[in-house]
Amino acid sequence: MKQLLIFVQKEFKHVFRDKKTLLLLFGLPIAQIVLFGFALTNEIKDANLLIIDHSKDETTLQITEKFRASSSFSLRESVMNTSEMEDAFKRGSIKLALIFPSQFEQDLIHEGRAPIQLIADATDPNTATMLINYASSIIRDYQQSIATKPPELSIQIQHRNIYNPELKGTTNFVPGVMALVLLLICVLMTSVSIVKEKEMGTMEILLVSPFNPILVILAKAIPYLALSIVNLIVILLLSTFLLDTPVNGNVFLLVGVSIVLIMAALSLGLLISNSTNSQQMAMLISLMGMLLPTMMFTGFLFPLENMPMALQVFANMVPSKWYYIIVKDIMIKGLGCSAVWKETLILLGMILLLLALSIRKFKIRLS
Amino acid sequence: MKHVTLEGISKSYDSTKAVDEVHFNVEQGELFGLIGPDGAGKTTLFRILTTLILPDAGRAFVNGHHVVKDYKKIRKEVGYMPGKFSLYQDLTVEENLSFFASIFNTTIRENYELVKDIYVQIEPFKDRRAGKLSGGMKQKLALCCALIHRPVVLFLDEPTTGVDAVSRREFWEMLKSLKKQGITILVSTPYMDEADLCEKIALIQSGNIMTVDTPERIVSDFPDPVYAVQSDNMSRLLRELRGSDQVKSANAFGEFHHITFSGGTESMDRFLKGLREPMLIKSISPTIEDCFIHLMAAHD
């Protein structure tokens, strides 16, 4: 026991003396949270909108005012011909154009109907769809406000976005980044640190000693477990105070399941380090084998439901997928144990499997 | 009492034989040298004896323990210093030593007497990181780390490779004083001139042990008188020596060529008469390297 303690102490010294790695260890999560939280958001804010008004009557001016008031759009100078509009699209200076035909108000009053044309830059189809939806709902609101008499039959849609009424992107990203950062750091750091002992030749000396080799693995895992918990707390603090996305559920439950994920990641790191002999190889496998699947198959960048069946099945093997579900449930929806026990059980199963594999693969000799 | 025993140990990597049916014994308290060039199989033998790799065939015992079945017991009792410097470069001298002490369930204080003579030399730098030490210092630290748990058998794999001449001599002095403490020491080296510093040596080449004996007896077993020769043009001289029927063997040894004659003094006289340019010749006693080359030729 005392030996283990001294070994853990030694590991902490390695970590704290390697300033660059330490910076990476704590800089990466902070940078990712800030990046995903602020820069890489898919919310629509101040999208450039061009209005071409051939009618210039009271109705078109009122609609224009509505758009001006919306925070989603920012109005450009209006132009009168379509070729200038095309130029603006080509330059990318506008995302959406709205065209009122001439005699818009007269048509509306006399014939009871009048067309409005919306043209969206669909190079990014998701954004285009969202812009059209936003613009349509503004126009629909206006239409209801000027309706003189209610139509005889009307279905009114009332929608409410629960858990995230303001449709903030951060509620989606924070759990994703948590999964990504914890998984990456734990897998990468543990695999590299064990392989380092092999590369430096110190493993040779450790093997020719009464120290139980399994304890080497345990001693390696403990410091990174501790550091990951610190990282987790930093992420949660940033999320609460900087991104305004607090933990709605039980914080201790969240930390608890996070430790389960960290352990799954640590066992994966051990497995990688047992199967490789150089730091480069370990790093390559950790990055290629972890970063990409985690980004793709966790569900926070691309919805899993839209993927082909084979990829959906594959996604089940990625630990962060389950963790992401758990974090969303606890952090955003504020649910308790009863909602997340199944996913937690899956993660625990993964830990058992990975640990069993890495202990089986662990070498008590050199080759 | 035999402390280390090898009985027909063989080990191959893929299709190349690293060691081939090796037999030898090391007595308790002996300073035993395993001498041979790079790639002769020294490290493989050490790794088999320290339980790091498994032999393909044969049996070996260290302090009475079987190297495969009782590997855990051996790991408790031996000290091992690998050929490559293998300590934590980012830990200080003192941290390294106390770490390895605690891995072996002991403390620096408990066995300080054993390492004292060596440790006092590096103690002024005890707060320096191991990676920043000079080559000789690193070796001394590594030796301290391998000794700190008072091993019964000490395995030193090429401890003097890449170390300057002064540090090498110091290192051998340290081994001699360790021997006095009753520790059995196995040391490997590619430097033939270090053979005389061992009590007993095994000459190894291409995985085969060519001979095991005391250095004195190996030298006295050398069959022919050896002469050292020198002239103004050494490479032409070597060509001439090797072309002559009277010369049995001729090898370059630094400033001199060491030669033996095929037919005793008669051959020598005949050869000297036929010489076209002046040559310095003197009778010498053979070195271990002469013996090594002789045995190597006999082996092929």
Image: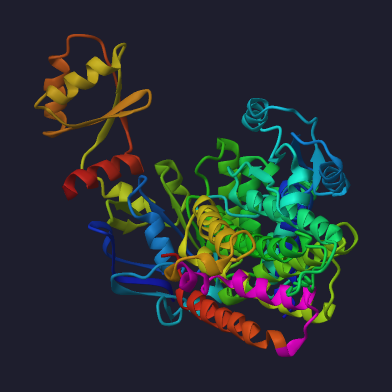
Residue stretch in magenta: A311-338
Whether A252 is drawn above or below B166: the answer is: below
Q: Quadrant of residue A103?
A: top right
Give x and y (percent) for residue A162.
79, 74
Q: Residue at x 12, y 23 (%)?
A: B243
Tell which of A44 and B240 is nearer to you.
A44
Instruction: Residue at the far top: name it.
Output: B277
Tell which of A334 and A134 is nearer to you.
A134
Instruction: Residue at the far right: name it.
Output: A241
In this picture, residue A362 sits left or right of residue B119: left
Residue A329 is one of the magenta-drawn residues: yes
Q: Residue at x 53, y 61 (%)?
A: A293
Total numbered badges shown on the rendered structure: 0
Q: Quadrant of the N terminus of chain A?
A: bottom right
Q: Is residue B235 visible?
A: yes
Q: Residue at x 56, y 42 (%)?
A: B168
Residue B142 is one of the magenta-drawn residues: no
In this picture, residue B149 sits left or right of residue B192: right
Give x and y (percent) for residue A78.
78, 31
Q: Residue at x 55, y 78 (%)?
A: A355
